[in-house]
Amino acid sequence: MSTSSRANSKPFAIAVVVGSVATLGYMFIAGKQTKAEEGPASIYKSKEQGGGLLSGTTDARMDSAAVRQTVSGQRKP
């Protein structure tokens, strides 16, 4: 008696769908939390439109050492 490969792959397919939905849910929640903490700032809008960095500074001229320090810095409380 041989078993169908479809029957063997069904649990894996279910696991993939559940994992994908869980990942998308986490990304949605993380995005909402980030937006709540950071506010509606956008790098694509001018300052008059409510965009730009909230601190009034720009990161466009940061060198690699400054980027590395910022990325590996302390987390917000």
Image (cartoon, rainbow, N blue to C red):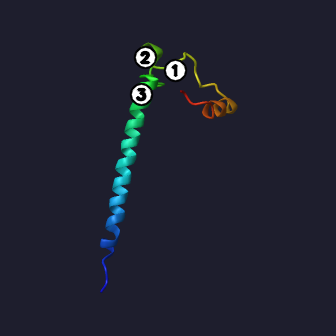
Q: Residue at x 38, y 31 (%)?
A: 32
Q: Is residue 33 above or below residue 49?
A: below
What whole-number distance in Å separates the C-alpha atoms at marks 3 and 2? 14 Å
Toward the right, the furthest residue is 65
Q: Which residue is mark 2?
A: 50
| Residue 72 - label | none
The image quadrant that residue 65 belongs to is: top right
Q: Earlier in the sequence, mark 3 or mark 1?
A: 3
Residue under label 1, please give it: 53
Q: Residue at x 37, y 44 (%)?
A: 24
Residue occupying the far top of the picture: 48
Residue 17 lies in quadrant: bottom left
* Label 1: element kind: loop
**How many numbered tags mark residues here?**
3
Q: Amino acid at mark 3?
A: Lys
Q: Is residue 25 above or below residue 72?
A: below
The front one of 53 and 73 is: 73
Side (left or right) of 70 relative to 12: right
Please tell me which residue lies in front, 39 or 44. Answer: 39
The N terminus - image quarter: bottom left
Q: Position of residue 63 (x, y in %)?
A: 67, 29
Give percent across and percent down for residue 12: 36, 64
Name the residue carrying label 3. Answer: 35
Amino acid type of disc 1?
A: Leu
What amino acid type should be assigned to the residue bearing mark 2? Answer: Gly
Measure how far apart labels 2 and 1 are at the Cα level.
9 Å
What is the secondary structure assignment of the residue under circle 3?
helix
The percent coordinates of residue 39 (x first, y second) are 43, 22
The residue carrying pointer 3 sits among few (fewer than 14), some (14 to 19) or many (20 or more) residues within 10 Å by Cα, namely: few
Q: Position of residue 72 (x, y in %)?
A: 63, 35
